[in-house]
Image: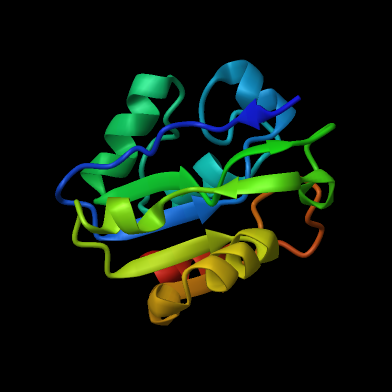
């Protein structure tokens, strides 16, 4: 049975798109991006901008939009058991071009290798915008937040 990701979060001012792979089980339960409290995503962004950690979905939306950041996942729907990217089967790819047509995206930060490889495979014409950063997932033992800080400055 297919599982579905989230709609993109963006407005006409967003110039950075942070692109994940597919929401985890915990994120799907929370019904929002990076809902696993162990995921480093929100802590990393709040540290990078030296701001208070957003808690509610409304605060998280306001936070990213304030910083002209759009959020989406490269996989719109798939079959998956659990949360690991390696478990993604039959991915349906999100229409990234439609978002880029609506917002002045200058950089696409891929949150991990799966998001990056699927993006490059499906959007070769936009590959010059893409940057692969270490996944913020708690499963990634080699996370380096300084790379995220540099990319967001």
- Image quadrant for the N terminus? top right
Residue plotted at (36% across, 42% down)? 51
Residue plotted at (38% across, 39% down)? 8
Q: Is residue 106 left or right of residue 54?
A: left
Q: Position of residue 36 (x, y in %)?
A: 67, 30
Residue 48: tell me if it is visible: no
| Residue that sits furthest to the bottom in the current view | 128
- Which one is in front, 81 or 62? 81
Q: Position of residue 124 (x, y in %)?
A: 47, 77
Residue plotted at (35% across, 25% down)? 59
Residue 54: which quarter of the image?
A: top left
Colouring mode (rainbow / by chain / secondary structure / one colour):
rainbow
- Which one is in front, 48 or 81? 81
Above or below for 104 versus 66: below
- Image quadrant for the C terminus? bottom left
Residue 108: tell me if it is visible: yes
Residue plotted at (77% across, 45% down)? 88
Q: Is residue 4 left or right of residue 130?
A: right
Residue 116: which quarter of the image?
A: bottom right
Above or below for 24 versus 135: above
Q: Position of residue 62 (x, y in %)?
A: 28, 32
Residue 100: which quarter of the image?
A: bottom left
Q: How many marks?
A: 0
């Amino acid at each position: 049975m297919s599982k579905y990701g989230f709609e993109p979060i963006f407005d006409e001012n967003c110039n950075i798109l942070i692109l994940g792979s597919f929401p985890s089980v915990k994120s799907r339960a929370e019904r929002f991006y990076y809902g696993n409290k162990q995921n480093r995503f929100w802590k990393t962004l709040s540290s990078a901008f030296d701001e208070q950690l957003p808690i509610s979905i409304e605060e998280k939306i306001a936070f990213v939009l304030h910083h002209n950041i759009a959020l989406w996942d490269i996989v719109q729907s798939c079959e998956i058991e659990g949360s690991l990217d390696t478990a993604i089967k039959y991915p349906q790819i999100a229409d990234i071009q439609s978002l880029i047509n609506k917002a002045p995206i200058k950089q696409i930060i891929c949150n991990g290798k799966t998001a990056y490889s699927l993006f490059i495979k499906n959007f070769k014409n936009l590959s010059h915008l893409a940057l692969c950063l270490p996944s913020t997932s708690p499963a990634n033992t080699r996370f380096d937040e300084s790379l995220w800080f540099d990319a967001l400055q």
